[in-house]
Image (tube, grey):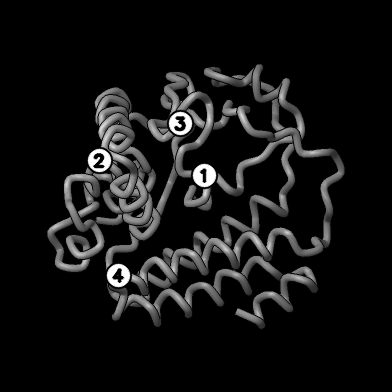
Amino acid sequence: MGEAKRKQQSGEYGPALTAGVRRNVAAAVPTLTGAKFEALMANLFAFAESTFASPAKDPPRRAIACKAGCAYCCVLYVQVTPLAAIRLAQVLQAMDPQARAATMARVESVYTRVRGKDAGARNLLAIPCPLMVDGRCSVYADRPFACRGANSADVEACRAGFGSDHGPKLLAYIHQRQVFAAVGNGVAQGLRDAGVQDDLLELVAALSLALAHDDPLAAWRSGALDFSSARCLEVAKQRASAR
């Protein structure tokens, strides 16, 4: 991923990041089992975070307001790839039995309330992500790229828009959004190149499906875990219109 990092520093980071990640994911998928999967996800997260931390061509003009305990954005419709959903399921399954049972119960409870809802409806419902515990993300180190890219320079604007469809426009640090979106796009495209399911999925629905399997990675590779019903509504609509 060195070429992608050089281009990022020259201001061409979006396409270069996506292309670099795409190649790495496509090459890794055919032998993606056990420790190799954990290593791939760890490397993707580390690469994205280090790229974001490196000097940007357009540094933030205002201080980022996001901090621990601020969770206004943690009610939104989150898109993830199958790899991200599987990794989160593994993290949840590795929790102590009490925490695992409580989280899985929250996943199913939230899923029954948000099933079939689009992004706008989800914002109005303002139902907290089931991975939140006491206002904080319980899987922060493994949170999806969409969550890593979310940011705001104005907490009052976030508060005003919470549960609303006409809140004020948020001032965000675009570099942060672009870096994590580019890496997430690269993962999806790498899966497509490898000839496996590459759909963008709705987080809660995908977790509900993945957690039904003791080994979600093996189940996905064998075809026993099919994420089709968790496909993001936007993707489903595009597929339907293309028929």
Which of disc 1 and disc 2 is earlier in sequence?
Answer: 1
Q: Secondary structure at mark 3?
A: strand
| Residue picked out by circle 2 | 208
Three-letter code for the amino acid on which mark 2 is drawn: Ser
- Specify the farthest residue to the right: 61
Q: Earlier in the sequence, mark 4 or mark 3?
A: 4
Residue 96, percent from left and from top: 31, 41
Give the mark toward the camera: 3 or 2.
3
Q: CA distance from mark 3 to mark 2?
A: 16 Å
Residue linked to disc 4: 34
Mark 3 — residue? 132
Distance from label 4 to label 3 (Cα)? 27 Å
Residue 153: image tag? none
| Callout 4 crowding tier (Cα within 10 Å): few <14, some 14–19, many ≥20 | few
**Which class describes the residues within 10 Å of circle 3: few (<14), some (14-19), or many (20+)?**
some
Return the disc, 4 or 2, that comes first in the chain's sequence.
4
- The residue where tag 1 is placed is 140
